Image: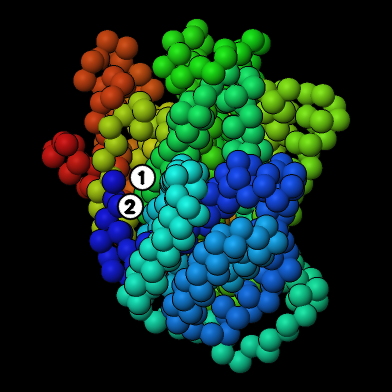
Amino acid sequence: MNALRLLRQRRFGAFFTVQALGALNDNVFRNALATLLVFGIGVEAGWDPAGLVNLAALLFILPFFLFSAVFGQLADRFEKSGMIRWIKLFEIVICAYAGLALYLGDVVLLMSVVFLLGFQSTLFGPIKYSILPQLLPPAQLTAGNGLVAAGTYIAILAGTILGPLLAGLELGWPWAVLVGTLIIAGIGWLAALALPPVPIGDPSLKLNLDPVTASWATLRRLGRNRNRLHSVLGVAWFWFYGSIFLVQIPAYTQGVLGGDERALAALLALFIVGISTGALLCDKLSRGAIEIGLVPIGAVGMTVFGLDLMLASPSTPLTEASIAELLARDGSLRIVADLVLIGVSGGLFIVPLYALVQSQSGNDERARVIAGMNIMNALFMVLASALAILLLSVAGLSIPQLFGVVALLNLAVGVYIVLLVPEFALRFLMWVISRLVYRVRVVGTGIQHLPAEGPALITCNHLSFMDPLIIGGTIQRPIRFVMTHRIYHLRGLTWLFRLAGAIPVAPARENPALLQRAFEAVDDALARGELVGIFPEGGLSPDGDVQPFRAGISEILARRPVPVIPMALEGLWGGVFSRAPGRWRRRDRGFFSRVQLKILDPVAPGQADRRELEALTRHHHDQLRSHPT
């Protein structure tokens, strides 16, 4: 996978190693401590083991509330690579202090270690995601975020398994935990030495060290950009949803499925491998861009498979069942598939949101924005714990029912996201559908010069009803297509075309008022900086050749001169979605046939001529036809 190539780059590979080992160390110590509290130190000291474990979780997350805003300022004020090296040295000091606490067996000291680990994670948090856009170009930002997410969750899984193993070694005192965490921290520090320096965000920033006022100012900063705020809330919701499932999987394995410790490790691995797979898939599906269309797709999967996990869960568990015994039970493969696909959907949901937050934040404030996001994440995780306690302990729901409730809540979130960015979800679906039906090959130098923002008019020959899906699925930005009013008003489909922002049009002889409204709608869209797609022939080709362009394109460009992006399609004539005679019998133009889309260099505003565009489109269409793929 292309994303994995980034690991070979020194600047990103070093950062990936630093952040993954940091997550690993946190989870090794926390899980080792939980094991020691439940089976050793906590019991011997007369403390309530369950209460200590919950206290440790609270102490770890508390610094995110208290210090995220302050540390976000530090990350914007000073050079980030140097800060990372000092943070990794601080981690080594914490590990040494943890060894002393373990040797003394002092519960209070061990709780302070957990707080310090949370403090160190809070210090690193704003740097972790704010430095990525400085290490990677925009085209690799999604891939980088996918790798970071995958590495983090794999580290969580490894720490969950390794921590109890180190704590359980039959030794005089758990020095293996000390040695293990020191080795991990030391390797992380060595990796940090390879990080290159990056530009300082805001060297003139005046620091506010008051946690309360700094936190309020940081949260207010999130609201300055509406799209960024929605992305931050989406990330926080993911942590709400994900923490519910991740925290409940141990109890679900033991109390619902009846599995043993190995079964628990296997199910945790399935869930985390799913998230990592989804995160890495984002780069492949995004094609080098920030693909927001993946977010509603991921939200749908999180709801569907979350509900199915509730329905697939058994009513009577086995007793101390191994993973082999669980898999032999009827319906177990359905549970396995649900856990994996929940994870995959979560990966598709979260990675584009992280990339969008980074891309919509300037280098001078990005760390403070990430700090605000971390505060929101911590808040939503606390709310998730409160909801789980309320539904399980007070309302008396079972764990599968809790999963179902959260999946239904996620449905509401998913609907809101689709309504918020319908054009991105629909554009991604265009890509999925068109690529499932055809083998599309995109050629031409124009693909490298497509405007990342601002208005443009897209023109193309019209061979089939699938043309808008192929074009719309190829261009990363949403396109508002002009379409005939007869198709626009098809019963049951008008709502979909309206959601996609399609513009209905009619010939002047049929409905001159609608034609004028179409011209006005196109002009308004271009004035707002949108892409508008038209088929200047005015209808599907009757013979597969390019037909004369209508005068409407001249009217559009006379009203508002904008860049024109000419395109040419070939390979669709003769298929079932064209108007070719005998199209239902032609196998060479059936499903999975080869289609070529040629994207030409943009024509500058005021330079486009209707007849020249027609001749250009005809020339390149004939060229594609004479040189099929």
Q: Is residue 386 above or below residue 492?
A: below
Residue 561, image x, y percentages: 50, 65
Give the color scheme: rainbow, by chain, secondary structure or one colour: rainbow
* Circle 1 residue: 284
Left/right of residue 440 with respect to residue 419 in the rendered view: left
Residue 466, image x, y percentages: 41, 30
Picture residue at 39% right of the left edge, 32% below the top: 434
Left/right of residue 144 with respect to residue 498 in the rendered view: left
Which residue is farthest right? 394
Kind of residue indicated by mark 1 = Lys
Left/right of residue 536 with respect to residue 253 in the rendered view: left
- CA gap, disc 1 to disc 2? 8 Å
**SS state under label 1:** helix
> Relative to the observer, which residue lies in front, 180 or 281?
180
Picture residue at 47% right of the left edge, 71% below the top: 92
Left/right of residue 42 with respect to residue 6 in the rendered view: right
**SS state under label 2:** helix
Label ID, residue 511:
none
- Whether tag 1 and tag 2 are in contact, CB under 8 A, the answer is yes
> Relative to the observer, which residue lies in front, 385 or 563?
385
Residue 216, image x, y percentages: 79, 71
Picture residue at 32% right of the left edge, 63% below the top: 13
Residue 571, image x, y percentages: 26, 31
| One can see residue 433 in this view | yes
* Circle 2 residue: 3
> Relative to the observer, which residue lies in front, 593 or 463?
593
